[in-house]
Amino acid sequence: MASTSKANDSQAITGLRSKKVPNVVMPNKDQRFLLYFIFGTYFGPDLKGKKSHKSVLQRKSEGLPPYSSGDLVGSHMEMIQLERIYYYILRKATKSLAVKSPLLDQFLKGNLPTAPGDESAAKYPQFPNLFPMELHCHSQSKNQCNIIENIVFIHNPEIGYIRIEHIARFGRLTGLEDFALDRDAAMLHGSDENDNVNSVIVQDGEPAGDLSHLGSSPRVRKIKRVQDVLQREDQHVRIPPVMKSAATSSTDAALTNKAPVLAKNEAYTGKKDDAAMLFFPSPPSREEMANIVAATRKGAALMGTAAMGKVGPIVGLMDIGECEDAYMFRVSLPGVKRDESEFSCEVEDDGKVLIRGVTTTGEKTVYRFSQTFEMLSQNLCPPGHFSISFQLPGPVDPQQFSGNFGTDGILEGIVMKKRQI
C-alpha cells in the first residue's frame, strides 16, 4: 500500500509539473534573421521634414546621429498593420519561417523567448532595440487598437548599404525577386492563419557578421531586384593593367562586395602588360578584403553591376592623364543614367575618385513605345546600382574639379593638383 501510495504521489507530482512547465516555442536562426531584417529594412522613424524616410538599419549603417522625441512627427501605426506587412513579405516563403502571431507580438514587445546559448538572439536583436520604447511608445488608440508611435512603413527601401550575403539569404528564404512592395497589398494582407504562405525549398544558412554593419550607402535606390544580387555569387574580378591604383584602406575594402581589381601581384609571373582575373568562390570577408586592397599597387575597385559586364561595352574602363598642374580622367559608362539625382562623381583631397550610378541595360524585358521585347541575350551589364573607385596619382583640390558626362557615355573630369606650400 505504501509503495502504491508513493507511486500515485509521484504520478500526481509529475502531472502537476507537466501543467506548470509550458511548451515554449523557440524561434530558429532563420526566423530571427527575418524578423530583424524585415523590421529593420522596411520600417524607420517618422521624422519631421523628411520627404524620403530611411530605415533604422540604413540610419545605423550610415552612422547618423540619434534622434530625440522633438524630431518625431507624432504619428502612429497599428500593430495589426505591422503584422500584415510581415506576413505579406513572407507570403512566398515556407510556412514554418513565419512566426505565429503570439511570437510576433512578443518580438514587437521585446519578449521573444531565447534558448540558452543561442548566439542568433544577440546577433538579431528584437524590435525595441531597433525602435526604443521611450521614443516609439506602445499604447492603445481611442478605438482600442494597439499602436506603435512614430514609425513609418518604407515600401521601396534603399538596399545599397546591405551586404550581398544578407540580400542573398533574404531572397532564398522569402522567394521574393524584388525589394519594392505593393504598399496597399502589404497593408491589407491577411494574417498567418490564412493559407497564403507557400511552401518552397530554402537553405538554412548563417552568414558571418552583424546586420548592423551592412556595407556602403550609395545614393542610388531605384533597382532592387533580389535575383540580380543572387547572380553575383559566382564572384569574379576583371584586371585591366591600364587602371590606376585602388583605395588602400580597410574602410574602402569594406565598402566593396567584390575584390578590388589588381594590376600587379607579387606572386604573378606573367608579362607586365598581361591582363588577369581573380576568382572567389564566395564573397571575401572584411579582413580578406582589407588584405587584398592593402596589396594593391595599381588598379580600380569595381562594385555592383560595374563588375558584372560580360560581352559588349564594359562599365568602368578608364584612362588617366596628367599635366603640370592638373589630372584628367575619362571613364566609360555605357548604359548609365545621366540623371543628376541618380549619378554622382566625387573627388577627395587625396585624389580618390568615387563614381556612383545606375545601369539601365541588361533587362530581361524591354518596353519601347507600344512594343514589348523579350531579350534573347543579356550580354550588357545588368540593371542596378554600381560604384567605381580609383586613385589619381597625387593629392588634388576638390574645389577645382569640373566634369562632364556626355551622351557618348564617357565621363570626363579635370581636377587641379593640390598646391605645394
Image (tube, grey):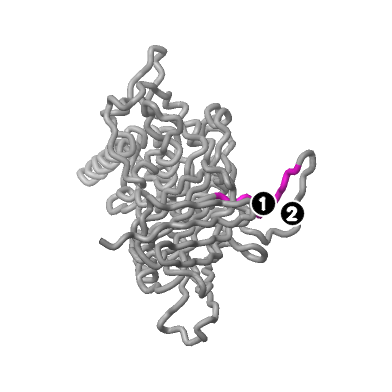
Q: Are marks 2 and 1 in contact (CB under 8 Å)?
A: yes
Q: Is residue 366 magenta?
A: yes
Magenta span of residues = 358-368
Left or right: 321 with respect to 333?
Answer: left
276 w.r.t. 212: above or below = below
* Nearer the observer, 211 or 9: 211
Residue at point 28%, 25% (across, down): 70
Between 202 and 72, which is closer to the camera in this rendering?
72
Residue carrying label 1 = 363
**Residue 139 percent coordinates (x, y):** 33, 21
Mark 2 → mark 1, Cα distance in angstroms: 7 Å
Pick the quarter of the image with the C terminus. bottom left
Residue at the disc numbered 2? 375
Across and down, in percent, residue 369 comes to 77, 40
Q: Helix, strand or loop at disc 1? A: loop
At label 1, the amino acid type is Glu
Q: Which residue is most to the left? A: 2
Q: Is residue 207 visible?
A: no
| Residue at the front extreme of this rendering | 324
* Badge 2: residue crowd in 10 Å (few <14, some 14–19, many ≥20): few
Question: Residue at 45% of width from left, 33% of height from top?
Answer: 52
Identify which residue, 9 or 226, lies in the foreground.
226
Q: Amino acid at mark 2?
A: Met
Can residue 225 be seen? yes
Furthest toward the top, the residue is: 142
Give the quadrant of the N terminus.
top left
